[in-house]
Image (cartoon, grey):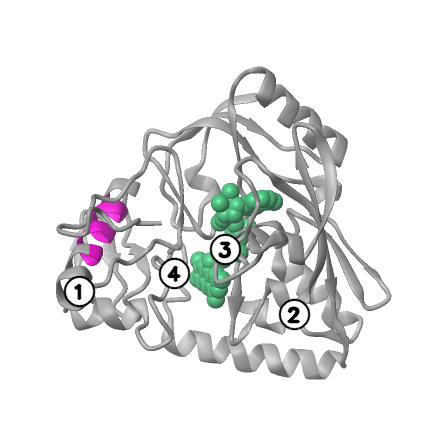
């Protein structure tokens, strides 16, 4: 078990302090061993994928952080079923699917994470999400592995029913016959749409807040409060899309959190809505309560 491994290099925003303990299991047995070690030492467990939707406290995380590698990041095809380790990057899965002439996963082309992170978040874009393609997942805790069907994972908008400390070690995704050319064309189309509206070339952690409703997007609400381009320390509300925070060079997680608190306070004032954060907090990060609502849950 490694100690005090800096997590800023494992997050797309590039901020965050050290993990007290850090493990890189490469098989289900190694993962189960690490989780048992955590239980025996009274340590909580956090998984990290590509760190594309996490904000890590600047002082670090008092937990065992696991990052999956080896066979837990591998990808293979079994007919039209893609079998991927929880630590496999979406981009690798998509590449394998495209080469085999299988479609249905193109929606994930602009989601820079892993399939395990995708299950935890029920990640989605362009009207499709993990729930639509997932067959089942092998989930590991200190008691060992179990296979959980998609229904039992209770996936909904950026939510799963996984318990704290559950780690997704493998997934099976159901794909559809297509052609490499059709997959390539669809991906190009989706990436062009993405580039036109989001800060794809900046360090961010993806969407900051969940959309409060189909009618009111979080980005539109923050923009309406005049916060596009608003800066605290090294963190900036993206001038391109207000539901993104950019690391403008020397941001800390505290800067990002302060910016989130300000956006949340202003949207509550303007729209009477308490935004819930989509980005997952690692470490003791908390948003302040909102005035007058008894502190509508921030998440
Ligand atoms: C530029 C950009 C664009 C994005 N666009 C989208 C989008 O269109 N749609 C969307 O839904 N998201 C989007 N995101 C957010 C992010 O990419 C997704 O939430 C992604 O699924 C997170 O995967 P990850 O592997 O990076 O997980 P991480 O960010 O590392 O972790 C996210 C959460 O998942 C947990 N987790 C990670 N791996 C596992 C595992 N193996 N088992 C159990 N839990 C795990 C972590 O503990 C944490 O709670 C975007 C992010 C960026 C930076």
Q: Secondary structure at mark 4?
A: loop
Residue 159's tag is 3
Residue furthest to the top: 41
N-terminal label among 4 and 3: 3
The residue indicated by pointer 4 is 207
In magenta segment, residue 149? no
Q: Secondary structure at mark 2?
A: loop
Whether residues under marks 2 and 3 lie with C-beta atoms below 8 angstroms apart, the answer is: no
- Alpha carbon separation for disc pair 4 and 3: 14 Å
Whole-percent x, y for residue 169 in the image: 69, 43
- Alpha carbon separation for disc pair 4 and 2: 20 Å
The residue indicated by pointer 2 is 105
Residue 297's tag is none
The residue indicated by pointer 1 is 227
Residue range (magenta): 255-264
Q: Secondary structure at mark 1?
A: loop
């Amino acid at each position: 078990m490694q100690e005090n491994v800096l997590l800023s290099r494992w997050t797309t925003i590039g901020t965050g302090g050290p993990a007290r303990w850090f493990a890189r299991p490469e098989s289900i047995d190694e993962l189960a061993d690490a989780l048992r070690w955590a239980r025996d030492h009274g340590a909580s467990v956090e998984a990290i994928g590509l760190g594309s939707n996490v904000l890590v406290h600047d002082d670090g995380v008092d937990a065992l952080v696991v990052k999956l590698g080896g066979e837990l990041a591998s990808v293979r095809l079994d007919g039209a079923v893609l079998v991927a380790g929880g630590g496999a990057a979406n981009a690798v899965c998509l590449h394998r699917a495209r080469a085999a002439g299988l479609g249905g996963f193109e929606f994930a082309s602009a989601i820079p994470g892993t399939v395990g992170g995708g299950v935890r978040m029920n990640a989605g874009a362009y009207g499709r999400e993990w729930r639509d393609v997932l067959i089942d997942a092998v989930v590991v805790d200190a008691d060992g592995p179990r296979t959980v069907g998609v229904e039992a994972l209770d996936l909904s908008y950026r939510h799963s029913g996984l318990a704290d400390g559950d780690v997704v070690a493998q997934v099976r995704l159901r794909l559809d016959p297509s052609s490499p050319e059709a997959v390539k064309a669809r991906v190009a189309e989706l990436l062009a749409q993405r580039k036109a509206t989001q800060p794809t070339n900046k360090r961010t952690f993806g969407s900051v807040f969940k959309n409060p409703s189909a009618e009111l997007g979080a980005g539109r609400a923050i923009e309406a409060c005049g916060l596009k381009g608003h800066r605290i320390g090294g963190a900036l509300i993206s001038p391109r899309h207000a539901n993104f925070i950019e690391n403008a060079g020397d941001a800390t997680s505290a800067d990002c959190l302060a910016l989130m608190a300000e956006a949340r306070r202003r949207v509550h004032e303007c729209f009477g809505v308490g935004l819930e954060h989509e980005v997952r907090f690692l470490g003791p990060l908390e948003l302040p309560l909102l005035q007058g609502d008894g502190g509508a849950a921030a998440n």
